Amino acid sequence: MAEIEVFVEINASVDKVWEIVSDLDNEPKFWKGTKEVKNISKNGNVVKREVVIAFRDQKCIQEIKLLPKEKIEIVFTKGIIDGNKIISILTKDNKTILKVNWNIKLSGIMSMFTSVIKNHIENGTIQSLDKIREEAESR
């Protein structure tokens, strides 16, 4: 399993940060590794969707649980990625902390390449959080 933790301090309110990260349809704008999203169903605060990721244009199915202004839990339920991504919003010294934890591996025969993609995902997450920070601070 690849375990990754990345965070960024943002000079913006929790409300502004939540507005950006909870807009699931806009994810490709901020997350380089997400090429396309298609919602399949929504039941309360749980969304099931199909995602096309940049890695070989693979399709994955995700189940997403939104915990308003606190956390987004994303579980990969089908496709080349097994595991989860947790996006958390915290506060510290009048700043908003946006933290992302990945706990994933590639599935099937591709699992041997999990360590190879770890750095790629970590760097992509850093870039994504910087884009989200810039957007939140400019609003």
Image (cartoon, helix red, strand yellow):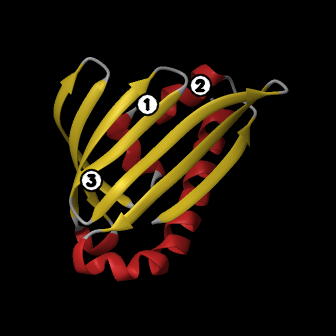
Task: Indicate the position of residue 90 as horizontal and vertical percent values.
Answer: 67, 29
Pair 3/1: label in front: 1
* Figure quadrant of the N terminus: bottom left
Who's the residue at 65% across and 42% down the image? 133
Residues under labels 3 and 1: Cα distance? Answer: 16 Å
Q: Is residue 16 above or below residue 119?
A: above
Contact between labelled residues 1 and 2, with CB atoms less than 8 Å apart: no
Please state if 106 lies on the left or on the right of 103 as rendered. left
- Residue 32 visible in the picture: no
Residue 16 is marked as: 2
Q: In the displayed image of the protein, which residue is found farthest to the left? A: 40
Secondary structure of residue under mark 3: strand
Which callout, 2 or 1, points to the residue nearer the camera?
1
Q: In this rendering, would 19 be left or right of 48?
A: right
Residue 87: % across, % down: 52, 40
C-beta proximity under 8 Å, tags 3 and 1: no
- Mark found first going from the N terminus, 3 or 2: 2
The three-letter amino acid code for the residue at tag 3 is: Glu
Around disc 2, counting alpha carbons within 10 Å, would you say few (fewer than 14), some (14 to 19), or many (20 or more)? Answer: some
Q: Residue at x 42, y 37 (%)?
A: 73
Q: Quadrant of residue 75?
A: top left
Q: Give the CA separation, mark 2 to mark 1.
A: 10 Å
Q: Which image quadrant: the C terminus? A: top right
Q: Amino acid at mark 2?
A: Lys
Q: Which mark is residue 22?
A: 1
Residue 4's spot in the image, x, y percent? 57, 59
Left or right? Give the position of 8 relative to 55. Answer: right
Residue wearing tag 3: 36
